[in-house]
Image (spheres, grey):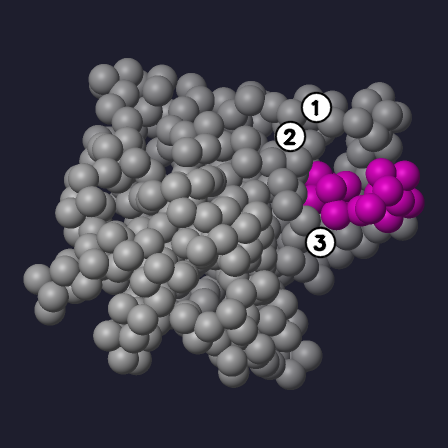
Amino acid sequence: MTLFQDTGGDPRAQQRLLADLLALYGAVGDAARGCRPQTSGRVAATAVSLAGVAGIAPDLTDALYFAGLLHAVGAIGNRAHRAGETLPERIARMEDWDVPAQGARIAETIAELPPATADLIRWQAERWDGTGYPDQLRWHGIPRAAVVLALASAFVACDDPEESLGFVTDGAGRAYSPEMARTFTMWFHTVGGEVAAVAPPLDALAPVLADAHATLLDRIADRIDAHLGVDGRWQRVARLSEGAAAILDLAPVERNALAIAARIYGAGEVTSTPAVVERSEAAFDPLARLGIDDRAAHALAAAAMLDGIAALAPVAAIVGARAEWFDGSGKPHGLRQKAIPRAAAVLAAAIAYTGLDHKDRIDGAAGTQFDPAVVRAILETAKVRA
């Protein structure tokens, strides 16, 4: 099935859609590394702003934007950040050192990105004194554009913009060259610590192949599942959702949004702390109220990642309502019956069915947790596909 609205072959529209999916990838990376929401977009905008003062060439500035957007994607699936993974502090630190290199490898698989993007991601953690990673570059062996990305990340990571000024100044001669530290200071006083949002440089993206969007979305879904230790889960949920949606005769636009939701709903779980992961693994039952607060939090987190991403806006309401119950006792908003988007009702039942050891148990939740018609459609789909 077609996941996204037909762009009519408009290259600009295809590039815009790809940029939206890259923004999603960046948001999941932020969650995996424990960054605040919208960090990747802020890093991208800050890097572009800094590049203007640093005299970075336009083609590298475009690459900087996308490198900023994808700065943390290497954390998705990394052992230091993977859900439920418990490592000694020293081992976790060593694993974390691979995040830039892993992010570069991910960027290399996205053919439409500007050529320099992967290298900028790889070298964002190099240091002037040679103690950075992964390649221990030093001095002028570190590309200036990569230093700009590092400075942008440092700026965004600080709670107070003024803190970043002291942080960068203290790092002059160790983390950053004295020249780049001065450039940052000049930039900071020029913009006053305020950075405006930047539109993605769509023209810097190579022509987008017809299946590139679906391929990228599936890759993101695969990495989310790998990060959560549930390989193949989204495929099972998607198959059930698609079959049930056909039986229920959902409108094409709803079916498309549901297909996307089935792939990325797990992004909300990437935000979980180790305590939440442990609690969910020990007590989770898809048909029990125990754990519903965590499921609602995951639903809201996934919806928040889609906030502001135009192509994925219709999906936000679906993933955000997957913990609502048919009888109105669900969360986070206590929606009931027809107030719950039909696609969200299908997604919730498909997720629950996939997680059950005894599949027939879902029938007992019809009329309370799930829409009875949706349960019938899920069971019929499962029977056909068995």
Q: Earlier in the sequence, mark 1 or mark 3?
A: 3
Can residue 235 be seen at all in this image of the molecule? no
Tell me how far mark 3 sits from mark 2, CA to CA: 22 Å
- Left or right: residue 19 versus residue 49 is left
The image position of residue 184, as x and y in percent, is 80, 34
Main SS class of the magenta portion in the image: helix
Q: Secondary structure at mark 2?
A: helix
Can residue 360 be seen at all in this image of the molecule? yes
**Residue 111: which quarter of the image?**
top left
**Viewer-closest of 283 and 27:** 283
Q: Which residue is mark 2?
A: 45
**Residue 382: which quarter of the image?**
bottom left
The residue most toward the left is 384
**Viewer-closest of 216 and 74:** 216
Q: Is residue 41 above or below residue 246?
A: above
Find out whether the residues at labels 1 and 2 contact each other: C-beta distance under 8 Å: yes
Instruction: Say what amino acid the circle numbered 2 marks.
Output: Ala
Q: Which residue is mark 3?
A: 127
Read off the magenta span. 151-167
How many numbered marks does the figure carry? 3
Which of the labelled discs sits on residue 196, or is there none? Answer: 1
Q: Secondary structure at mark 1?
A: loop
The image position of residue 221, as x and y in percent, is 36, 54
